[in-house]
Image: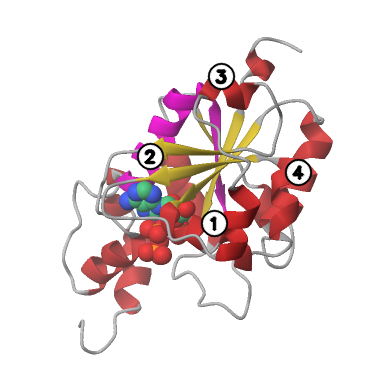
Amino acid sequence: MSPQNNRPLAILGGTFDPVHLGHLRVAWEAAEFLNADVHMMPANVPPHRSQPVASAGQRVAILRAALQGQDRLLLDERELKRDGPSYTVDTLIELRKEIGPERAVVLLVGADAFSGLASWHRWQALFELAHIGVLTRAGHEVTESPELAEQTRNRRAVSVAELRQSAAGLVIDIRVSALEISATHIRNELAAGREPRYLVPAEVLADRTLLAAYRANASPHER
Ligand code: ATP
């Protein structure tokens, strides 16, 4: 294994509708904390959930543009290449086939997403495939259900060195900057005709077709 491939591989999945500086900053902080490559992985949204406003192509184009000029955060389009809903467990199985069983993989999730982990498809299998890095920030506390607490009780890691000793199965808190930015807020700002400058990569504001899509999505109230 080359030294490069010995580094943990982390994944930050999301809708990225659109990607904002909260996503990029926490991904960067996680990359530095873990000394990992972070794969930014836009999801295919299952038909029964509310669909992203921007198309997959638009979400990817903005993400690609936002990632230029650095090489720690990588665009990973694998979930968009698969038909149907993006179950994380399937993504990790696919990734493991590529990279083998030994390299540490860290699934990054926000505190809110982690709190709901026990509702994810085949969630217990996630621990066989990856570590979980919980992006903790002030004001967003984790509330563990009894079954999640039971599952994670003996899995807590307190250092990155500990994580690196195994490929999967541990949970680590990663303290990140508390940037109160959400894609919902960005979409609402755009729909209301305001400009969320300095909350999103400049490419979002430069893409007229994308702006038109968010604008067209405005509720009558926002217009
Ligand atoms: P929406 O408002 O549409 O639900 P979002 O801004 O939460 O979107 P997602 O694409 O759903 O963005 O998020 C992907 C991942 O990034 C999730 O794990 C989420 O918890 C995390 N995340 C989103 N915004 C932030 C932020 N400001 N700081 C830290 N983590 C974040």
Mark 1, other Cα within 10 Å: few <14 / some 14–19 / many ≥20: few
In percent of width and height, residue 138 lies at 27, 48
Q: Secondary structure at mark 2?
A: helix
Q: Are marks 1 and 3 in contact (CB under 8 Å)?
A: no
Q: CA distance from mark 2 to mark 3?
A: 20 Å
Q: Residue at x 34, y 70 (%)?
A: 214
Q: Are marks 4 and 2 in contact (CB under 8 Å)?
A: no
| Viewer-side label of 4, 2 | 4
Residue 134 visible in image = yes
**For mark 3, what is the residue?**
161
Residue ranking furthest to the top: 3
Mark 4, other Cα within 10 Å: few <14 / some 14–19 / many ≥20: some
In percent of width and height, residue 54 lies at 45, 65
Quadrant in the picture for the C terminus: bottom left
Position of 5 relative to 65 (above/below): above
Q: CA distance from mark 1 to mark 2?
A: 23 Å
In percent of width and height, residue 84 lies at 72, 68
Q: Earlier in the sequence, mark 1 or mark 2?
A: 2
Q: Are marks 1 and 2 in contact (CB under 8 Å)?
A: no
Q: Earlier in the sequence, mark 3 or mark 4?
A: 4
As for residue 3 lying within the magenta part, the answer is no
Residue 26 numbered mark, or none: 2
Instruction: Tell whether 48 sits left or right of 207.
Output: right
Residue 57 numbered mark, or none: 1
Q: CA distance from mark 4 to mark 2?
A: 25 Å
Q: Quadrant of ligand 1?
A: bottom left
Instruction: Tell whether 7 sits left or right of 115.
Output: right
